[in-house]
C-alpha cells in the first residue's frame, strides 16, 4: 500500500495476511481501496467510516469475518462496495443502500443473514445489487420496484420466501435477474413484459406455480430463460416462437402439458433446451435440428411419441441428447451417426430396448 497517502491503496493478489488495521481510519484522503485476492482475516474495522472521501472499497476473495460495520453508511461518496467471497455474517446495514452515490454493491458468497431492507430512500442510482449465496431470508419487499435504474439483481442461493412482488416489473432497465435456489412461491409476475431490457431471467429451483404469462413473450431480446424445478403448469404457449434470440431455455421439472409448439422452429439460436420431467405429449419437432449451435437437448421423462427425427443427424455440435422415459418408437441406431461428432452422452429407450442392452450399446458406440 505504498500509495495510500496519495488517495489510493492498491495491493491485490499479493498474498497479504493479517487483518485490516483500525488505523486505516487515519488515512482520510483515501479514495480507493483495492485489496482483493489476498489472505486478509478478521473484521472490517468501524474506523472505515472515517474515510469520508472513499469512493471504492474492493476486497474480493479474502477471509474476512464479522459483520459489515455500520459506520460504512457515513461514506457519502462511496460508489462501489465489493466484498464477495469472505465469511461476513450478521445483517446488511439497512441504510447502506441509501448512500447517495452508490452504484454497485457485491456481497455474494458470504454468510449474511436477515431480510432485505425497504428500498424507500436514495437508491435510484444503484445499477448492480449482487447478494447471492448468503443466508438472507424473509419476503422480497414491494419496494424492490423503486430500483428503477438497476441493471443487475442477483438474489440466488438464499432462503427467500413468499412471492415475487408485482412491483418488480418497474425495473425496466434491468438486464439480468437471478433468483434461483430459494423458496419463492406464487406466480411469474403478470406484467413481466414491461421489463423490455431484460436478457436473462432465472428462478430455477423454487416453488413457483401458475402458468407462463403471455406478456413474457414481449421480451424479444431475452437470450436465457431458466424457470425449471418449480411447479409451473399449463401448456407451452405458441408465442414462444417470438423469442427468436433464445439460447438457453430450461422448463424442466415442472408440470407443463400439451405438445412442444411447432412455432419453436422460429428459434434457431438454442444452445441448451431442457424440457425434461414434464407431461409433454406429441412428437419431437424436426425443426429443432435448425438450431445448429445446440449443445444440450433434454426431452426425457415426458410422454412424447413417434421417432427421434432423422434431422438430428445435422446437429454436429450436440454433446448431450436425452430422450429416455418417453413413449418413443423406432430404432436407436438412428442416433449412431451423432457419435461421430462431439456427442458425449445419449440417453434413449425407444423401441423397447432394455436399459442394460442400451447401455452396452452406448459403451460400444462411445
Image: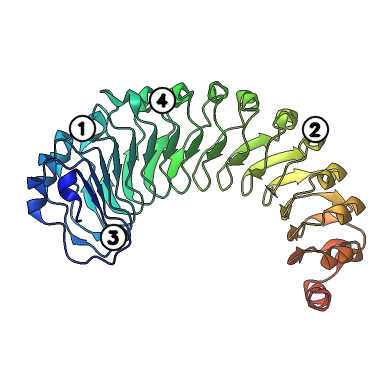
Mark 4 → mark 3, Cα distance in angstroms: 30 Å
Residue 356 at x, y = what percent?
A: 78, 76
- Tell me if residue 364 can be seen: yes
Q: Which is nearer the N-term, disc 4 or disc 2?
A: 4
- 175 above or below 338? above
Q: Report helix, strand or loop for mark 3.
A: loop
Choose mark 4 or mark 2, whichever is in front.
4
- Tell me if residue 308 can be seen: no
Q: Which is nearer the N-term, disc 3 or disc 1?
A: 3
**Which quarter of the picture shows residue 31?**
top left
In this view, the residue in front, 308 or 161, is 308
Residue under label 2: 263
Residue under label 4: 149
Choose mark 2 or mark 3, whichever is in front.
3
User: Measuring 10% from the left and 40% from the top, which residue is drawn there?
Assistant: 50
Residue 73 at x, y = what percent?
A: 17, 35
Mark 4 → mark 2, Cα distance in angstroms: 34 Å
In this view, the residue in front, 359 or 121, is 121
Instruction: Tell me, for residue 62, which label it has, or none.
Output: 3
Q: Report helix, strand or loop for mark 1.
A: helix
User: Measuring 80% from the left and 49% from the top, which residue is drawn there?
Assistant: 304
Instruction: Tell me, for residue 95, which label it has, or none.
Output: 1
**Which quarter of the picture shows residue 80?**
top left
Mark 2 → mark 3, Cα distance in angstroms: 49 Å
Residue contact between numbered discs 4 and 2, judged by CB atoms under 8 Å? no
Residue contact between numbered discs 2 and 3, judged by CB atoms under 8 Å? no
In this view, the residue in front, 34 or 221, is 34
Q: Report helix, strand or loop for mark 4.
A: loop
Residue 235 at x, y = what percent?
A: 70, 34
- 174 above or below 331? above
- 189 above or below 53? above
Amino acid at each position: 500500500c505504498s500509495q495510500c497517502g496519495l488517495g489510493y491503496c492498491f495491493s491485490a493478489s499479493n498474498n497479504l495476511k493479517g487483518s485490516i488495521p483500525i488505523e486505516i481510519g487515519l488515512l482520510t484522503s483515501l479514495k480507493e481501496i483495492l485489496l482483493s485476492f489476498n489472505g486478509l482475516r478478521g473484521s472490517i474495522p468501524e474506523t472505515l467510516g472515517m474515510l469520508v472521501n472513499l469512493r471504492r472499497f474492493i476486497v474480493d476473495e479474502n477471509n474476512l469475518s464479522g459483520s459489515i460495520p455500520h459506520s460504512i453508511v457515513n461514506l457519502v461518496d462511496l460508489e462501489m462496495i465489493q466484498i464477495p467471497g469472505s465469511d461476513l455474517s450478521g445483517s446488511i446495514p439497512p441504510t447502506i443502500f441509501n448512500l447517495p452515490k452508490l452504484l454497485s454493491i457485491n456481497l455474494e458468497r458470504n454468510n449474511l443473514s436477515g431480510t432485505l431492507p425497504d428500498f424507500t430512500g436514495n437508491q435510484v442510482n444503484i445499477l448492480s445489487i449482487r447478494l447471492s449465496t448468503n443466508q438472507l431470508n424473509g419476503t422480497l419487499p414491494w419496494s424492490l420496484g423503486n430500483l428503477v435504474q438497476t441493471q443487475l439483481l442477483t438474489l440466488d442461493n438464499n432462503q427467500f420466501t413468499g412471492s415475487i412482488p408485482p412491483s418488480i416489473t418497474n425495473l425496466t432497465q434491468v438486464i439480468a435477474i437471478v433468483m434461483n435456489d430459494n423458496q419463492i412461491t406464487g406466480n411469474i409476475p403478470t406484467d413481466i413484459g414491461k421489463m423490455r431490457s431484460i436478457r436473462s431471467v432465472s428462478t430455477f429451483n423454487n416453488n413457483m406455480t401458475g402458468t407462463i404469462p403471455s406478456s413474457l413473450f414481449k421480451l424479444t431480446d431475452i437470450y436465457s430463460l431458466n424457470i425449471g424445478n418449480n411447479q409451473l403448469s399449463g401448456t407451452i404457449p405458441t408465442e414462444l416462437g417470438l423469442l427468436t434470440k433464445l439460447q438457453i431455455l430450461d422448463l424442466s421439472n415442472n408440470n407443463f402439458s400439451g405438445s412442444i409448439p411447432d412455432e419453436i422452429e422460429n428459434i434457431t439460436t438454442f444452445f441448451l433446451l431442457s424440457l425434461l420431467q414434464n407431461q409433454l405429449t406429441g412428437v419431437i419437432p424436426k425443426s429443432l435440428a435448425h438450431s445448429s449451435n445446440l449443445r444440450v437437448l433434454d426431452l426425457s421423462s415426458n410422454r412424447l411419441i413417434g421417432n427421434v427425427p432423422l434431422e438430428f443427424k445435422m446437429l454436429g455440435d450436440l454433446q448431450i441428447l436425452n430422450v429416455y422415459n418417453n413413449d418413443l418408437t423406432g430404432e436407436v441406431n438412428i442416433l449412431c451417426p451423432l457419435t461421430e461428432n462431439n456427442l458425449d452422452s445419449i440417453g434413449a429407450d425407444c423401441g423397447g430396448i432394455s436399459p442394460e442392452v442400451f447401455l452396452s450399446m452406448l459403451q460400444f458406440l462411445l
